[in-house]
Each structure stands twice: as C-alpha cells, then as structure tokens.
C-alpha cells in the first residue's frame, strides 16, 4: 500500500498575493489584503497538518515503522521541490521521530532505490523519473517505491516477514482502516499493489 499526499497553493492564495502586490504600501487596503493572505496561509497549513495527523494515526496500527534518513533540504533544490514542499514530508518525519511509535532509521547513504529487493543486484542508470524498475539479473519488475520499502525492511531484519509481494496480503481490516482514517481527507491518495506490482486507487 502506498500513501501520497499533496496540498498545493490554492488559487485563492495566488489571487490574494497579486492583490497585495497591487495595494499601496502603508494603506488600509494593503493591511486588509495582508490579513486575508495570512488567513489563507493558515488554512493551507492546517490542511497539511490534518493530512499528517491522519497518516500518523493510521501508522499507529502497526508495530514498527522504518524510514531512511534522506536529506529533505536537498530535495527542495531538485526538480520536484514543489511536490516536497506541498507534501510537508519533513514535518511528517519530524513528528514520527518525536512520537511514541517504534521507529527505526536507515542511513541515508544505504542504496535502497537502486538495489533489487529480490536478488540484491543494482539497477543500471536509474533516474528520478523512473517509477518502475527492472532487474536484469533476476527479471524482477516492480514499482520503484515499493521495491525501496522492501529493501529497507530486509535491511532492518532479513528474516522479517512483511506485507508485500509474495508475502501475507493486506487484511480487509487494514483497507477499512485506511478508508476510515485517511479517506476523510481529500488530499490523501491511497494505492494498493497486487501481485503483479500494479496498483488500484482509493
């Protein structure tokens, strides 16, 4: 299962930014426009906070959480910087680290995206835009993020039985919980992977 969330800048925010720029400095109208802009920023901030809180509430259903110590600040300089900013992934990681959930971290330099979870071979010329990866050694073809997750879990414990391809499937209760907890936020998207590695969306 993969969870995506993104709360972009609203059309109203962009409109208010233009209105503020047109107002004369020091005027009463500029002050009013500034107040409206601050309220809109607060609304967007609360939407992100709500999405993060719901994801953490869902993760509390599990006994262990694993994440990699990636450099979030460097992501902001990449071609997908807006997606990182809109998701608030840094805040999610910060809240996970400070929560009471059992969290295990993997070193940021561990090759998780570039290694095949089945045979351990490294993929050739893997780009950030490549969302499906193919292993020339064992023929494994899989979603990039799903593969990275399975690699991370195997690094934590090679003998660990986890939900994934060729492993115990998600139970109906988990699907129901994801719909109940995450489904109430329109900015969160949940996708479920089948045995072939393709996904269906909720």
Image (spheres, helix red, strand yellow):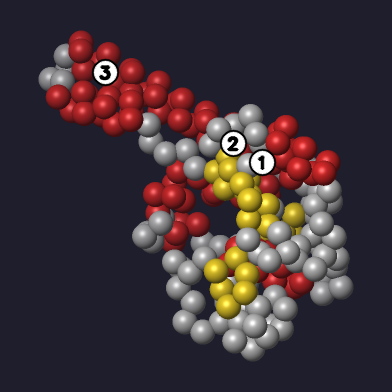
Tell me the quarter of the picture where residue 144 sits.
bottom right
| Labelled pair 1, 2 in contact (Cβ < 8 Å) | yes
Q: Dot 2: within a 10 Å radius of its alpha carbon, few (fewer than 14), some, or many (20 or more) residues?
A: many
The disc at residue 11 is none
Q: Which residue is mark 3?
A: 33
The residue positioned 71% from the left and 67% from the top of the image is 150
The residue positioned 71% from the left and 83% from the top of the image is 119
The residue positioned 63% from the left and 51% from the top of the image is 200
Task: Tell which of 79 and 194 is nearer to you.
Answer: 194
Task: Tell which of 81 and 136 is nearer to you.
Answer: 136
Q: Is residue 31 left or right of residue 141?
A: left
Question: Residue 185 at x, y = what percent?
Answer: 59, 32
- Label 1's element? helix
In three-dimensional space, the C-alpha distance between marks 3 and 1, rounded to whole angstroms, equals: 34 Å
The disc at residue 51 is 2
- Label 3's element? helix
Q: Is residue 19 left or right of residue 150?
A: left
Q: Which of marks 2 and 3 precedes in the sequence? A: 3
The disc at residue 55 is 1
Question: Residue 120 at x, y = what percent?
Answer: 69, 83
Task: Tell which of 54 and 145 is nearer to you.
Answer: 145
- Which residue extends farthest bottom? 137
Tell me the quarter of the picture where residue 64 sits.
bottom right
- Label 2's element? helix
């Amino acid at each position: 299962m993969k969870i995506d969330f993104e709360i972009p800048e609203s059309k109203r925010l962009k409109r208010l930014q233009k209105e503020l720029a047109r107002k004369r400095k020091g005027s009463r109208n500029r002050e009013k426009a500034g107040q409206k802009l601050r309220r809109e920023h607060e609304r967007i901030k609360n939407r992100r906070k709500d999405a993060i809180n719901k994801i953490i509430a869902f993760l509390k259903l599990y006994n262990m959480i694993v994440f990699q110590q990636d450099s979030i600040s460097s992501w902001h300089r990449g071609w997908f910087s807006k997606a990182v900013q809109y998701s608030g992934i840094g805040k999610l990681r910060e809240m996970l680290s400070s929560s009471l959930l059992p969290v295990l971290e993997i070193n940021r330099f561990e090759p998780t995206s570039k290694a095949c979870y089945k045979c351990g071979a490294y993929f050739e010329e893997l780009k950030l835009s490549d969302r499906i990866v193919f292993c020339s050694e064992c023929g494994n073809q899989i979603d990039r993020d799903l593969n990275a997750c399975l690699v991370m879990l195997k690094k934590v414990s090679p003998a660990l039985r986890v939900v994934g391809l060729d492993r115990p499937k998600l139970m109906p209760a988990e699907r129901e919980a994801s719909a109940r907890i995450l489904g109430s936020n329109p900015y969160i998207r949940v996708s479920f992977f089948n045995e072939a590695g393709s996904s269906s969306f909720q």
